Structures are given as C-alpha cells and as structure tokens.
Image (cartoon, rainbow, N blue to C red):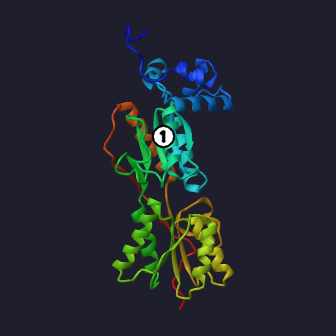
Amino acid sequence: MTTASAPGRRRSGPSIGDVARLAGVSPQTVSRVSTGADSVRPSTRAKVVLAMDQLGYSPNRAAQALRNGTFGAIGVLSTGFQRTGEALTAEALVEAAALEDYSVTLLHVRNPARESWDNAAHRISHQAIDGLVIMRAEQASPATLALPTGMPVAVSFSKFAGHYPTVSADQVQGSEDAVRHLLGLGHRTVHHLAGPQDSEHALVRSGTWRRCLLEAGIRPPEPVYGDWSAHDGYEAGRRLAADPEVTAVFCANDEMALGLVRALHEAGRRVPDDVSVVGFDDIAVAGWTSPPLTTVRQDFHAIGRALITLVVGQLRLRSVPPPALTVVPTELIVRASTGPPPR
C-alpha cells in the first residue's frame, strides 16, 4: 500500500531526500542510519546525523513500524556505565531484553551540562528503538530531557520518578538497617560518608541516616561528602580518622567505604576494633576485603529485569501505565567490618 499527498499540497517538514542531499549520500544510506543498521561507516553516520539535526528531520517511526514491525531494540540512557552498580544493572538489562527478543542500544551522556541533555533528546528521536530505560541521569529532569511522545519509558530512581514508571532498591529500608545495626552495637553516634548532593539515591540515604539518629535522640554530626569513588572515600577517611570521636561510619556506597578503610588503616585505626564501617551495594569484592565489609545488598539484576519488564509491558499493551514505583528489597549483610565501640 502506498500513500501520497493530495495534489497541490506541499509536504511539511524535511524529507529523507533532503537529508541525503545535505549529507552527500544516497537516500538508502539515510534509511540505514535511521534504522540503526550496522553497515554504515562511522564517518558517514556522523554526516547523516548532523544533516538530520540541521534540518530538524526525525525518522517516520510509524512508517518504519508498519514496514518492519518493531525495531527490536530498547535504548538505555545513562551518564555513566563505569560504576559497579550501573555496570551490573546494564548487564541485567541486556540479559532480560534478550529473553524478550530485544537488543539494547546504550546511549551515553558524558557531559552533565544542559546542552548535553538537549542533544541526548535529539539523538533519542533519531535512534531506532522501541522504548527507553533511563538508568542514571542525576543532572537531568523531565524539563531538560524532552522525550518523543508516546515512547515507552521506565526509569531508575531519579528526578524522573513520579513522571514515568520507576524501579528502585529499597533505599530507605537499607539505610535504616545500616544505621540501626551500628547503634545496636552500642555506638553513641554514626557518622556518614555521603554521596553527591545531586544524586537522588544519595539524598535518600543521607536523609534516612539523619532521621534514624534524630529518632534515637542523637544530634547528627556533619556528613562528609564524596563522589562515589574509592579516592573520595580515602580522602574523607583521612579527615574522619583524625577525629577520635568517630567510632562508626555509614558510607553511601561500597567503593567509598573501601577507600575509608584504607585511610583508617594508614592512620593506625583498626576496623572494627576502633571504627566500624558499613557500605551500601554489596559489590563483588566486598566480601573479600580485609576485613570483609558489612554492607547493604542491592539486587542490581532484579532492578534491571524489572526495568525491562516495565518497558516491554508498555510495548505489548500499547498503553502507558501510571508512574508507579516498583521497590526491590535490600538486605543487610553483616561481616567483620562492624563491632562494638572501643571500651
């Protein structure tokens, strides 16, 4: 079946031919770029995408779906895949998508600036994807990332929570378990090595830590902030190690906790005899450190599977569900890095 414009009616918007002429390629090449085909050289693909952006051209997704069914791909947008949590979640996303006969297209935003998110929105509209998972986007919000209308979306907990179906580990329960474990061992207070202040996960963990101390009648000490890295944990640890009043620290993730443990060791403060340390994530090496790290286990694979289930469900039902929150339970794993305070 073919369609045509009515006689004398001008076609609105740029065509695939306009893009081809500006890029100096054939219309077939533009079509291959718009459907995500691998048989296009990177330099050619870059020229075509640039021409699309300059002309404001967006591939006709409806026509492509009529010809090809669906694209068979789900996009995954993140500002980084280098952290252990994101890497494990991405691995689970790929595995879960494959079971549903979908491939995964990774969309990486390297720069947190506003214009980078504007560019990301343009790139998403040019990608041959059926749905989108937003995994880590602390610096973006629905206002800074205008997504294509009607695209099935699921998000990891972030500023997008409340706007799209969301999946998150139980940050509150995990943080409560960590703080109450340390207080239950007899520590008079619990210090906190917090994550970045632009991270929703970090804000929930630090807010829960503060609330738990206040409920116990304890004035919370000033938190120390890090960037999730072992390096920042080490630098913060050097400051905490210099304070003899510090006997227990709840860290917003395991990597910072491991940096803290090293700093305490170098300062001659023993873990857990002098200072107890709790992390968050239960990364693979947490049980193999010296001493093994007490931590809150997040089920990253369950999070990844749930995100794919939400997107595929929207694709099959052809409807957008309410922006509900799916909560994945956490578990406190008690190891040798925590104990009673020094006498």
Q: Is residue 59 left or right of residue 45?
A: left
Residue under the point 41% across and 10% down: 4
Q: Is residue 191 left or right of residue 51?
A: left
Residue under the point 67% across and 32% down: 42
**What SS does tag 1 mark?**
helix
Residue 192: image location, x then y, percent: 49, 74
Judge whether residue 286 can be spotted in this image: yes
Position above or below: 267 against 163: below
Foreground of the two, 122 or 195: 122
Position above or below: 201 against 324: below
Foreground of the two, 81 or 225: 225
Residue 276: image location, x then y, percent: 54, 78
The amino acid type found where label 1 is placed reads Ala
For the image, the number of numbered tags is 1
User: For the view shown, which residue lies furthest in the left direction?
Assistant: 322
**Quadrant that contains the N terminus:** top left
Return the residue at label 1.
Answer: 121
Residue 142: image location, x then y, percent: 40, 47
How packed is label 1: few (under 14 Cα within 10 Å), some, or many (20 or more)? some
Residue under the point 54% across and 21% down: 18
Residue 299: image location, x then y, percent: 49, 55
Residue under the point 46% across and 51% down: 140
